[in-house]
Amino acid sequence: MRRLIRRMYYHYIVLTKDPRSTADWIKQTVNATIKKYEKTYEMLHNKQKNIVKIFIDEITQFQKTLERGEKKLNEIIRSKSPTSLTIALQLHPHAQNLDNSITGQEAFLLYDTFGFPLDLTIEIAQQQ
């Protein structure tokens, strides 16, 4: 669930480029989801405020993770060749052309040290 919430938030930020309206977006998203499923899951309506709080707490934490991780990822990207960037995640002894690749070691550092998800590392690198 955490991964889904984080992916939703990341794509929301990419599309809107406005993290300030996050709380309103969360409330609208949660309310719409609860409305859709409340007949099947009656307890959702009673727990709506708690669900919104959980979403806000998770996204607040993820905002910090994104800031730190994107900063480090941008440092890594700037250190690479200016040609198209790739991800060299396979641990292959004959991997070549790593001057324009984010290595598995760098991707792991982003995840392990900064909490930056691998799927976002790949997605951002592919956009470069």
Image: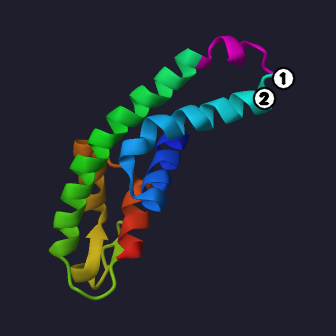
Q: Amino acid at mark 2?
A: Tyr
Residue for badge 1: 40
Please state which of residues 43 and 104 is positioned toward the viewer in this rendering. 43
Q: Tell me, yes or no, whether the two marked residues, 1 and 2, touch with CB atoms within 8 Å.
A: yes
Q: Is residue 98 visible?
A: yes
Amino acid at circle 1: Thr
Looking at this view, name the residue that lies furthest to the right.
Answer: 39
Crowding near the residue tagged with mark 1, few <14, some 14–19, many ≥20 C-alpha atoms within 10 Å: few
Residue at the image position 39 percent from the left and 53 percent from the top: 18
Left or right of 15, for residue 97: left
Identify residue for label 2: 37
Q: Secondary structure at mark 1?
A: loop
Q: Label 1, label 2: how many angstroms apart (C-alpha)?
A: 5 Å
122 shown above or below 36: below
Q: Is residue 89 visible?
A: no
Does the magenta run of residues contain 46?
yes
99 over 91 or under it: above or below = below
Q: Which residues are magenta?
A: 39-48
Classify the position of the N terminus by image quarter.
top right
Q: How many marks?
A: 2
Task: Name the secondary structure under disc 2.
Answer: helix
Query: In the orientation shown, which residue stands out farthest toward the bottom?
Result: 83
Residue 58 position, x and y percent, is 42, 31
Does 95 appear in magenta?
no
Q: Is residue 50 above or below residue 52?
A: above
Instruction: Residue at 42% x, 43% y: name it.
Output: 21
Residue 106: where, in percent of width, then height?
24, 60
Residue at the location (36% across, 70% down)?
125
Apparent side of residue 37 relative to residue 118 in the rendered image (left or right):
right
Q: On the image, which quarter does residue 93 sit in? A: bottom left
Percent x, y of residue 81: 20, 84
